[in-house]
Image: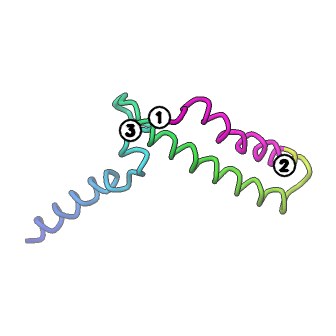
Amino acid sequence: MKSFIALAGLVVFLASPVLAQSAAEKTGVNSVMGVAPKTEDFVTEVASSDMFEIASSKLALEKSDDATKTFAQQMITDHTKTPTNSRRWFPPAR
């Protein structure tokens, strides 16, 4: 009985990284197998990443030194451009 419990615990321990995959990893973005992501998944991942970069950079503008504030402002400028560029890269389906 003890060996069964130990074996079950080992199986759960070894399987836990599989359960910890992010949505991006499950959909093919960052896939190790070389499977390209669907366009919708890629666009969603980019938008999520941009929102994080903008929010964290706004926080840096409030609470950091001048050099970091300069970098944070550049991050905000760059990541605000993505929606405009993505409309050009991925035009709406007709």
- Determine which residue is flagged by label 1: 93
Measured Cα–Cα span from mark 1 to mark 2: 40 Å
Q: Which residues are magenta?
A: 71-94
**Neighbours of disc 3 within 10 Å: few (<14), some (14-19), many (20+):** some
User: Which kind of residue does numbered mark 1 sit on?
Assistant: Ala
Residue at the farthest left position: 1
Of badges 1 and 3, nearer the viewer stands: 1
**Neighbours of disc 1 within 10 Å: few (<14), some (14-19), many (20+):** few
- Determine which residue is flagged by label 3: 28
> Residue 66's mark?
none
- Image label count: 3
**Which of marks 3 and 1 precedes in the sequence?**
3
Q: Residue at x 51, y 45 (%)?
A: 45
Residue at the farthest front position: 94
Q: Looking at the picture, does residue 37 appear above or below residue 48? A: above
SS of the residue under disc 2: helix
Measured Cα–Cα span from mark 3 to mark 2: 34 Å
Residue 57: percent from the left, percent from the top?
A: 75, 53
Q: Looking at the picture, does residue 16 appear above or below residue 47? A: below
Q: Residue at x 55, y 32 (%)?
A: 91
> Residue 68's mark?
2
Residue 83 included in the magenta stretch of the image = yes
Quarter occupied by residue 82: top right
SS of the residue under disc 1: loop
Near-viewer residue (24 or 33):
24
Near-viewer residue (86 or 74):
86
